[in-house]
Structure formats: C-alpha cells, structure tokens
Image (cartoon, grey):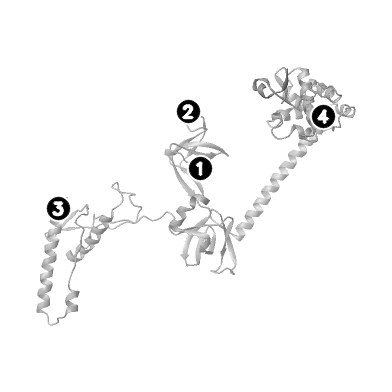
C-alpha cells in the first residue's frame, strides 16, 4: 500500500511540475504581465506523507488517481467495522480535493472522510427548573403564557437566540428564557439529574427475575421495545421497577436511555388537573364505600355477639365496638391456644389501654403502628366479618370483669422468636411468652 501511494504521489508531482511549466510558458508569451497576476497562477498542493489511507485506483487517460468517497452523515462507525476515520484521513481527503482540481476527475470514491460525531441531544433543550418553566407567545417576559414545561421535560429547539429561544415541546410552541434551560451537548452533563433512566428491552423476550441470578424466580416476561424504570445499572444485572416492585433483568439484553417528557398547553394542563381531581374523588368515594360497609358489618356482628350486656357490666369504659374488636384480636392472635393464653392476651391489651401509652381506645391500641401484626395482615378482618371464637369471647368477658392474669405485663411474643436476654421477667403460656423488659 505504501509503495502504491508513493507511486501515486510521484505521478501527481510530475503532473504538477508539468502544469507549472505550462503556466510559466504561457505567462512568458502573454502580452499581459505583472506580479499580482503571476501570483494568481501559482498552484500549491499539500499532503500528509504519514497518513494511512485506503485508496482505490481508477485508470483514466493512462493516469492513476486517488478517488474520494462522500460522507453520508451517519453516526461514526455505524456501518464501518474499521471504526471512525482519523484526523489523518481528513487531511488526505482535503488533499484529494486538490487532486480532483488538478486531474479534473469528477467522481472520487473510497478515500475516507472524517465524520463529526453529533450529540444525541443536538437541537434539543432540557429545562433547568425545580417545578416548571413558562412558555410565552413572544420573546419577552410580559408576553402571554401559552404553556408550561415541567422539571425533567424538554423538546426541540426551532431557533436559539442569545436570551430567548423558540422551542416546541409536545403540543406547546413558543419562547423560553435560555437561562432556565440546557441546550445541545450541555444536556448530557445534566440529564442524569432530572430525567428518569429507562431500560429498553433489546431482545425478543426477556425474563424479569426476583433476584440478580439465573436461578432466581421469574416474575414475568417483557418483550422487545418494552421500557422499565431503572433503579440501578449493574455490569451483569440491572435493577428495575416491574409491576410496582423492584426486580432484575440481564444487562446484556437491554439498552438504557433517558426519557425526556414534553410540556403541555394551558388547555392540556387544565384537562390534566380535572382528570386528576376526578381520579382522587373516585378513590375517596371508594374508600368511603368500603368504610361504610365495614362499619355496617361490624355493627351487625356486634348485635349478634351479645357484647352489649358485657360492656354495660364491665369495669372498663368500652364501646360495644371496642369490646368486639378485642375479642376478634384475641381470636386472631391466639384463638387456637388455651383459655389462659387467650385471657392473657386480652389483659395485655387492656393493660396497654389503662397505661395510656398506646392509645385511648381499644381500637387505637390494636391498630397502633407495628404492634399487632394480625391487624395489618388481614387475619383479624376474617374474625371481624365472621365473629370471634367463643373461647375468645369468654376470655374477654372475664378480663373486662376484672380477672387479670397478666398484671404489669404489656408485651408477648411467639415462643420460637423470643429473646429471653432482653426480658426482666416472663411467663410462658402455650406457644406464647409474656414478658416485662
């Protein structure tokens, strides 16, 4: 290849010298002479001897000339296994243009031309605000607001000025102040801060797993083009959000991209607000419906339980509802244990009520945060609907009458989970440990 290039350079040098002789001869025979005109007829050719170029040859008029190929403006290296053209390629390409002038060859091919990489955010913008940026009809702060672009959103730059720019984002088009946005390549330095990263599935089907290993359970399948919100990108596994929970997909079969949202017109904003208000109203209505159903079910259950008489004769000031809930909690916690164990649980709850440290009603004591697991996992709900066990009802009646077998005890735990080193005093009844700290 080097020998071939040297041969080409020698041929072209001879051509240049020949042309120079012709030019000189022509000047001498001309009637018009002068320093300026002579300077205009000089031709200078420069080239880089160290450049390594893949040059094909074209025979024309018994001369071999280098033939340059035009760039198609594609991404650098996209269709070229050799990679991106070097700076040396660009230098020789420019020389090739001079060759074209000298040799009068119209179509040059196969000399690499340097392709300049463009930012993926070329001609785009991303707002730099904490809430939203107004889009105005004209390039001044007194102009009408025609839309809003919220944090993490952006769009297309139609025209960029020194202070204001004309943009398009979704259906809103207008002017924004440059100081509240990033443009072009500057977006790359900030997009991680404001835009959500998504994993785009790059294979026909991909398993979503519970843990980052191929032996983990499969939670579901996603297909080519599906997008999953990224929590963390790993070398082998990427943590994503799948069906409102964290999961993992193989990093080898995804591509990550930031999805930049678009703004909205004022009309679209009002429609979105109205839709959200309707959604919230529907949620509240459903919650109210369920609450009324639960109250009715509880009232009916209390009426059929015979607790009214128990409450009236109780030493505690309890409502019928609280007495019923107490029996349901005892059934859910230790309904299959002995009567003594059920009586102990009832008294622990009443001890907490009497202390005032856990709530001012049986309901508040039972539903206190992180206290009785049966109040959170649905076990107690079944007894509320269907009624407590008869042994639990009797245990509650006796506890309300003053039969306390757990004076001063406020806690109990499942025996296998007990930590005796933390207990100053404890009593074991069946599968439960009642203790003081």
Q: Is mark 3 on a helix, strand or loop?
A: helix
Q: In which quarter of the image is the C terminus?
A: top right
Q: Is mark 4 on a helix, strand or loop?
A: helix
Disc number placed over residue 230 in the picture, else none: 1
Residue 290 versus residue 417 in the image, above or below: below
Q: Earlier in the sequence, mark 4 or mark 2?
A: 2
Q: What element carries label 1?
A: strand
Task: Measure how far apart labels 1 and 4 are at the Cα level.
Answer: 49 Å
Residue 37 versus residue 390 in the image, above or below: below
Q: Determine contact: label 4, label 3, CB under 8 Å.
A: no
Q: Where is residue 223 in the image (x, y as percent from the top left)?
A: 47, 39
- Residue highlighted by disc 2: 215
Q: Earlier in the sequence, mark 1 or mark 3?
A: 3
Task: Measure how far apart labels 4 and 3 are at the Cα level.
Answer: 102 Å
- Residue 311 appears left or right of 188: right
- Residue highlighted by disc 4: 323
Q: Where is residue 205 in the image (x, y as percent from the top left)?
A: 45, 37
Tag 3: Cα neighbours inside 10 Å, few (<14), some, or many (≥20)? Answer: few
Disc number placed over residue 4 in the picture, else none: 3
Q: Can residue 391 be seen in this view?
A: yes
Q: Where is residue 221 in the image (x, y as percent from the top left)?
A: 50, 36
Q: Determine contact: label 4, label 2, CB under 8 Å.
A: no
Task: Measure how far apart labels 2 and 1 are at the Cα level.
Answer: 22 Å
The image quarter containing residue 359 is top right
Q: Which of marks 4 and 3 is nearer the N terminus?
A: 3
Q: Earlier in the sequence, mark 3 or mark 2?
A: 3
Task: Measure how far apart labels 4 and 2 are at the Cα level.
Answer: 50 Å
Disc number placed over residue 151 in the picture, else none: none
Tell me what residue is drawn at x 42 percent, y 38 percent: 252
Residue 160 versus residue 186 in the image, above or below: below
Q: Nearer the viewer, residue 236 or 422?
A: 422
């Amino acid at each position: 290849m080097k020998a071939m290039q040297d041969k080409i350079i020698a041929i072209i040098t001879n051509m240049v010298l020949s042309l120079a002789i012709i030019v000189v001869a022509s000047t001498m025979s001309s009637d018009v002479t002068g320093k300026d005109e002579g300077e205009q007829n000089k031709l200078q050719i420069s080239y880089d001897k160290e450049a390594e170029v893949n040059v094909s040859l074209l025979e024309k008029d018994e001369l071999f000339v280098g033939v340059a190929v035009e760039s198609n403006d594609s991404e650098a290296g996209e269709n070229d296994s050799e990679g991106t053209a070097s700076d040396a390629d660009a230098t020789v390409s420019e020389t090739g243009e001079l060759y074209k002038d000298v040799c009068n060859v119209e179509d040059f091919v196969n000399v690499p031309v340097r392709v300049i990489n463009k930012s993926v955010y070329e001609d785009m913008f991303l707002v730099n605000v904490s809430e939203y940026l107004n889009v105005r009809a004209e390039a001044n702060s007194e102009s009408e607001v025609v839309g809003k672009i919220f944090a993490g959103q952006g769009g297309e730059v139609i025209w960029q000025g020194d202070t204001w720019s004309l943009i398009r984002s979704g259906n809103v088009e207008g002017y924004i102040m440059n100081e509240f946005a990033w443009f072009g390549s500057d977006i790359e330095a900030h997009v991680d801060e404001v835009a959500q990263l998504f994993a785009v599935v790059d294979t026909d089907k991909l398993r979503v797993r519970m843990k980052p290993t191929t032996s983990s359970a499969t939670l579901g399948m996603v297909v080519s083009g599906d997008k999953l919100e990224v929590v963390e990108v790993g070398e082998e596994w990427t943590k994503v959000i799948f069906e409102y929970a964290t999961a993992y997909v193989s990093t080898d079969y995804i591509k990550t991209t930031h999805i930049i949202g678009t703004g909205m017109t004022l009309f679209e904003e009002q429609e979105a607000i109205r839709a959200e208000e309707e959604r919230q109203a529907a949620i509240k209505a459903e919650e109210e419906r369920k609450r009324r159903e639960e109250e009715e079910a509880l009232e009916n259950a209390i009426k059929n339980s015979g607790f009214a008489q128990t409450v009236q004769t109780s030493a505690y000031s309890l409502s019928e509802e609280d007495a019923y809930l107490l029996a349901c909690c005892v059934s859910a916690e230790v309904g299959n244990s002995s009567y003594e164990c059920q009586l102990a649980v009832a008294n622990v709850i009443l001890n907490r009520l009497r202390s005032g440290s856990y709530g001012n009603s049986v309901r508040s004591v039972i539903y206190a945060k992180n206290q009785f697991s049966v109040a959170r996992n649905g076990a107690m709900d079944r007894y509320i609907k269907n009624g407590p066990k008869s042994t639990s009802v009797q245990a509650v009646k006796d506890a309300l009458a003053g039969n306390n077998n757990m004076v001063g005890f406020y806690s109990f735990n499942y025996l296998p989970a007990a930590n005796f080193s933390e207990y100053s005093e404890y009593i074991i009844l069946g599968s439960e440990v009642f203790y003081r700290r």
